[in-house]
Amino acid sequence: MLAVSYSLPLAGQTTATTSTVPNQQGLQSKALDLASFEKVWTTIRDKHWEKNPGGLDWTAIHDEFRPKMELAAGTPRARDVLREMLSRLRQTHFAIVPGSVYADVEPSANDETHGDGSTGIDVRVLDGQAIVTKVDSGSSADRAGVKPGWEIDGVSGVLLAPLIDRLKKDPSLTGLTLERAVQSRIGGPIGETGRFAFLDGSNHLQVIPLVFSSPRGVISSFGNLPPMHVWVETGRLGNTGYIAFNMFLDLVHVMTQFGNFVESCNRCDGLVIDLRGNPGGIGGMAMGMAGWLVDKPDQKLGTMLMRDVKLNFVINPRAQVFTGPVAVLVDGSSASTSEIFAGGLKDLGRARVFGTHTAAAALPSVFERLPNGDGFQYAVANYISEGGKPLEGVGVTPDVEVRLTRPALLSGHDPVLDAALEWIKGQRNTK
Amino acid sequence: MRRKIAAIGLLAGCLSLPLVVLPALAADDAVPQAQVTLDRYIDVTGGKAAYQKRRNEIATGTMEFPAQGLKGTLTRYAAAPGNEYSVIDIDGIGKVETGVVNGIAWEMTAILGPRVKAGEELNQSVREATFNAALDWRKIYPKVESAGIESVNGEDCYKVILRPSAGNPETMFFSKKSGLLVKTTTVAVSQMGEVPVEILVSDYKVFDGISVPTKVVQKAAGQEFSIVIASLKTNADIPPDRFNPPAGVKALLDKGANSAPAPAR
């Protein structure tokens, strides 16, 4: 399947513009926005896996939102109307991507001056605080001496604690939304500098200017999906193989690297697959990767349910399969294809899952372009993991729940990884 | 009228090539027997003699998933009696290779790796690989029946249901005016499950005496893709090993993946 199971991080809302008398260009734009509205509404009517999408009277939704769309002044406001309509579904993987996102990257996918910049910091909300969980080697944060476990107090004068407090109090927001809201605050335009206020390991305030540079990895394009930076990290921890990748994208390279690594690790004591922070991507990659880990024929990770079709996420055992212990690491930012992969292997009894509950956002979806140039992501199916439960709204509960803590990170430990390694060591001793 | 059916397993079988066609006959209000419609198709696409001159073919073209913004290229080799090798290369997905040789059907993709088909999926692939299948419809479909007249995109068509000896029936729609195949529907079998498929064919062009539809639009599982054939060479110089499975598939065959028996032909 070409369905993408990817939880879109582009959650930023646009602001409405003031109403003006439309000129000729405005009339054209209005027509394109209305055509986009009809495209979105019709697509969901025809392709949503439920005949009554989200249990709603979809015709009534049209009648309610079409007048709002006609009154919307400008594409940003029209986008807001579409987003409001989509929110009625109360399902993930329905999104409107501003056309400017494509415009920024389409002129030259390799133009490093465009797009969101990174300082090399990965962050999670731990006990209500934005804590650095990882610093990329060679990044501006690394060069400035930023360490895992430091708390990010604010960026360029904007404090993070009030944002976290506010979002945590909103029962309609998921943990994934909170994490992404925080992550979006620590990025910035490439080439510019953000003033980061940290509480270091001794709880001393340090204000450090950090330059935003091109994110780690290579830019990968997949049809209408906005281009993304993709990286793969492999290594050995003693005689245990470790592999992490930030997305299920850049299909050919990531699949090749994954397969080569697993095959090179055939004599390893175990394998750790780190999907923390991985928002998903091409759903089929979960099936393909599982083929290097499952040697029994006729196995599947789960089932995708469309309106008239049921498709199994089958596993094709490869000629050379790793049969040792497999640990999969997840957290609240592991979404979509990550959940399909982790949940399916857990249900099959093939992997032990460590970490915290996943994002519960796993609907196979596709991206199309709308007449007004915006991108439109829509889910085309529900997904039931092999254990019989949907992942959407439920997620994957780890076999071993382990939380990152600031003290552990400050002391150079990763409790989730440590727990996985300890389990693999125990499996070896059991043999 | 042969063409590969659905492309459900990650584009497996994306190549849908209806490979036959016919000249117009006088319109007639009576619905002809299915056999007449199928034989007329042979005639209007070039005739029995033209088909019998063909030993193999190489087709090249492009394919596109317009809604998803994905594009690629394809090349398909086919030879009598029923060998086939196809490779589709799609931006962002990589190569999708499929083949049928000596009753073994296989697939190898960048995403799922190699696999050997079995069961009804194998039967379906072998049927689809039959070279000059239009001539052999009586062998492939022991039972055919006419099911009236239906409009396809505004064109009156004879609807014919074709039942293979095993597997799902196929329903074909032949233009009442031209006798050409316009549409096929069936339930395709893939590794991921059974999927209703609709295949629209058009833009017939003559290659070495045979009319071939050069545009194929396939709709399945909420997705649509199109194929445009740019060239088709018949009786080409195809290396004998062209139909050999790649190493990854051979490794699976060596492990015993080909346990399912080949279908009777």
Image (cartoon, coloured by chain):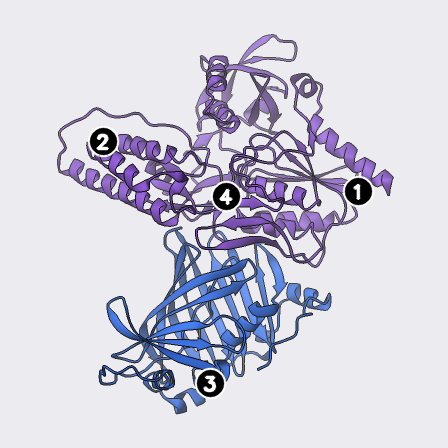
Instruction: Kindly identify the amino acid type of the residue bearing the numbered disc 3.
Output: Arg
- Residue receiving disc 3: B138
User: Which amino acid is tagged 1?
Assistant: Asp
- Residue at 77% x, 46% y: name it: A324
- Residue placed most toward the observer, B206 or B149: B149
Q: Residues within 10 Å of mark 4 (few under 14, many from 20)?
A: many
Asked if disc 2 and disc 4 are in contact, CB closer than 8 Å, the reply is no
Dot 3 alpha-carbon crowd within 10 angstroms: few under 14, some 14 to 19, many 20 or more = some
Amino acid type of the residue that numbered disc 4 sits on in the rendered structure: Ser
Give neighbour class at mark 2: few <14, some 14-19, many 20+ (Cα, 10 Å). many
- Whether callout 1 and callout 4 share a subunit is answered yes
Residue A170 to residue B74: above or below: above
Where residue A380 sits in the image (x, y, percent)?
43, 47
Tag 3 secondary structure: helix
- Do the residues at discs 3 and 1 belong to one chain? no
Give the quadrant of residue B119.
bottom right
Report which residue position mark 1 lands on. A269
Q: Chain of mark 2?
A: A
Chain A colour as displayed: purple
Residues behind callouts 2 and 3 on a single chain: no
- Figure colour of chain B: blue
Q: CA distance from mark 1 to mark 4?
A: 31 Å
Q: What's the amino acid at mark 2?
A: Ala
Say which mark, if any, is on residue A5. 4
Residue in the foreground of this view, choosing between B46 and A39? A39
Mark in the foreground, 1 or 4: 4
Q: Earlier in the sequence, mark 1 or mark 4?
A: 4
Which residue ends up furthest to the bottom in the rendered image?
Answer: B49
Residue A72: assigned label: 2
